[in-house]
Image: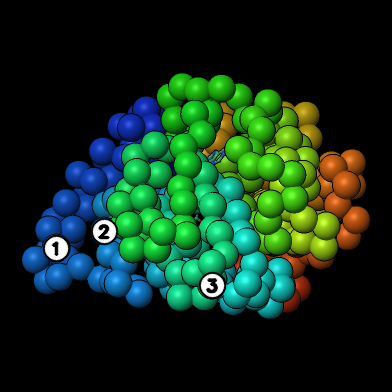
């Protein structure tokens, strides 16, 4: 049943998927609206039916990543930061009471409605938080746009101290990810850090993942996909290839924190694998 529902879901257009979600969650959203919406730092949180950016508790996950940013990415209050694939502001909202008001937060995303939504909910209250639309194609999220392979982040060289891409490279094709590692290196100042999450294929995850609840069944060249039809549904990369691209992009060091998605037996940090490039 779950498999059929997933196939049906991925057969819809990106807009169709968002509408389908609104429809399924309509009763819960109506109840929550009547009960009174939830807020963090004065910002209204999106309703379950509006959240097209992944499962789990929206606020709780944002707060968990705030801790990773500080602990693993050495984020500090006086950093200028970039959010690659800012979605509905899951990472931005918990940082509104952390980043100094004279430092910059910049986020960009391919879903225009999400960018507008963040501008209304977040930038209207925190003007140092800005959100931008990038008109790029992604078969999970958009129906048209240019390829991410040739996209230049709309910022000058050496603009940021810290950047992140949470659950974004897990939905992008290899050429786009390679370009984004280069672009992140360009816009981050020397000494800055870039934290990104991945599904990394190495010896251990290959062994575990096929029997896990999170199998990547389709391999094309060195990239693994969960859905043959909608490639952006979930994408896994060979860990050594990512490290090679990072080196070519000019990142000198990488720290890997494995996640539990594949069911690997060793100690894990989050669900997805995390790499901090510095
Ligand atoms: C799973 S959601 C995660 C959103 C957000 N990073 C978070 O952690 O809540 C993936 C996001 O990546 C965005 N995205 C997909 N391809 C992108 C690209 N090439 N450039 C920027 N954002 C992209 C999607 O629109 C979506 O908002």
Element type at mark 2: loop
Residue closest to the eye, 201 or 183: 183
Q: Which of the 4 image quarters holds residue 273?
A: bottom right
Left or right of residue 183: residue 29:
left
Circle 1 sits on which residue?
A: 33
Circle 3 sits on which residue?
A: 100
Identity of the residue drawn at 45% across and 69% down:
96
Q: Which of the 4 image quarters holds residue 186?
A: top right
Spot occupied by residue 138 in the image (x, y as percentages of width and height): 52, 31
Left or right of residue 171: residue 51:
left
The mark lying in front, picked from 3 and 1, is: 3
Spot occupied by residue 134 in the image (x, y as percentages of width and height): 51, 34
The mark lying in front, picked from 2 and 3, is: 3
Please rate how many residues cluster around mark 1, counting C-alpha atoms within 10 Å: few if below 14, some from 14 to 19, many from 20.
few
Dot placed on the residue nearer the N-terminal end, 3 or 1: 1
Circle 2 sits on which residue?
A: 47
Does the beta carbon at disc 3 come under 8 Å from ligand 1? no
Q: CA distance from mark 3 to mark 1?
A: 32 Å
Identity of the residue drawn at 9% across and 66% down:
34
Q: How is the image coloured?
A: rainbow
In the image, residue 60 sits, relative to residue 17, either above or below, namely below
């Amino acid at each position: 049943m779950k498999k059929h529902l997933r196939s049906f879901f991925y057969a819809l257009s990106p807009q169709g998927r968002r509408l389908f979600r609104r429809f399924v969650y309509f009763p819960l959203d109506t109840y929550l609206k009547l009960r009174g919406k939830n807020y963090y730092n004065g910002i209204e949180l999106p309703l379950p039916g509006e959240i097209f950016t992944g499962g789990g508790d929206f606020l709780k996950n944002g707060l968990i990543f705030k801790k990773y940013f500080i602990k693993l990415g050495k984020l500090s209050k006086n950093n200028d930061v970039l959010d690659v694939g800012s979605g509905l502001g899951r990472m931005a909202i918990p940082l509104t009471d952390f980043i100094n008001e004279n430092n910059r937060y910049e986020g960009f995303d391919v879903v225009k409605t999400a960018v507008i939504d963040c501008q209304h909910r977040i930038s209207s209250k925190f003007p140092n938080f800005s959100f931008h639309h990038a008109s790029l194609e992604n078969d999970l999220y958009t129906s048209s746009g240019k390829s991410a392979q040739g996209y230049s982040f709309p910022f000058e060289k050496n603009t940021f101290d810290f950047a992140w891409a949470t659950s974004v490279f897990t939905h992008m094709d290899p050429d786009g990810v390679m370009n984004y590692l280069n672009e992140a290196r360009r816009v981050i100042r020397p000494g800055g850090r870039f934290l990104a999450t991945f599904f990394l294929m190495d010896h251990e995850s290959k062994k575990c993942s096929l029997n896990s609840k999170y199998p990547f069944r389709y391999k094309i060249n060195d990239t693994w996909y969960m859905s043959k039809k909608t490639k952006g549904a979930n994408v896994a990369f060979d860990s050594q290839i990512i490290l090679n691209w990072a080196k070519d992009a000019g990142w000198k060091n990488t720290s890997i924190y494995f996640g539990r998605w594949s069911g690997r037996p060793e100690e894990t940090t989050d669900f997805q694998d995390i790499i901090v490039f510095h």
